[in-house]
Image (spheres, grey):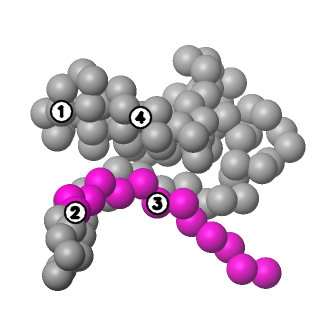
């Protein structure tokens, strides 16, 4: 069975009638698609939380305005929902090792 990863990347695009170029600026994070459909909500939230911890860390280094950051986060959350603030509480301190 094939396994797929969802990868959040930030690209810079330049498009004209003659040319179309896209340059990957940064990989924000990735998550295996199967973790988005796990029926156990705590497990699903844990994996989504790991994804968002990485994304948040990368976004902070970019120096984006609040508005741009919020728009970017909204687009990403359409595919990978952000879990509640307690996503890692049930797992102890496991999230600190990632």
Pointer 2: what residue? 13
Answer with mark 3 or mark 1, whichever residue precedes in sequence: 3
Q: What is the span of residues highlighted in magenta in the rendered image? A: 1-13
- In the image, which is nearer the foreground, mark 2 or mark 4? 2
Query: Extreme right residue here?
Result: 39
Pointer 1: what residue? 64
- In the image, which is nearer the foreground, mark 3 or mark 1? 1
Q: Do the residues labelled 2 and 3 touch (CB within 8 Å)?
A: no
Answer with mark 2 or mark 4, whichever residue precedes in sequence: 2
- In the image, which is nearer the foreground, mark 2 or mark 3? 2
Q: Is residue 27 visible?
A: yes
- Residue 73 badge: 4
> Left or right: where does residue 61 sit relative to residue 8?
left
What is the crowding at mark 3: few (fewer than 14 residues within 10 Å), some, or many (at least 20)?
some
Q: Do the residues labelled 3 and 1 touch (CB within 8 Å)?
A: no
Identify which residue is drawn at 61% across, 21% down: 84
Identify which residue is drawn at 41% across, 34% down: 73
> Left or right: where does residue 94 sit relative to residue 8?
right
The answer for how far apart the CA atoms under marks 2 and 4 are is 19 Å
Q: Are marks 2 and 4 in contact (CB under 8 Å)?
A: no
Where in the figure is residue 95, as x and y percent of width and height? 50, 35
Q: Do the residues labelled 1 and 4 touch (CB within 8 Å)?
A: no
Query: Extreme front residue here?
Result: 17
The local secondary structure at tag 4 comes to helix
Pointer 3: what residue? 7
The local secondary structure at tag 1 comes to loop
The answer for how far apart the CA atoms under marks 1 and 2 are is 17 Å
């Amino acid at each position: 069975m094939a396994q797929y990863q969802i990868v959040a990347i930030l690209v810079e695009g330049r498009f004209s009638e003659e040319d179309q170029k896209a340059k990957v600026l940064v990989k924000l994070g990735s998550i295996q698609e199967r973790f988005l459909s796990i029926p156990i909500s705590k497990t699903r939230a844990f994996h989504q939380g790991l994804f968002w911890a990485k994304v948040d860390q990368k976004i902070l280094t970019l120096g984006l305005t609040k508005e741009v950051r919020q728009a970017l986060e909204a687009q990403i959350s359409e595919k990978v929902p952000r879990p509640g603030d307690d996503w890692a509480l049930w797992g102890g301190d496991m999230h600190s090792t990632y």
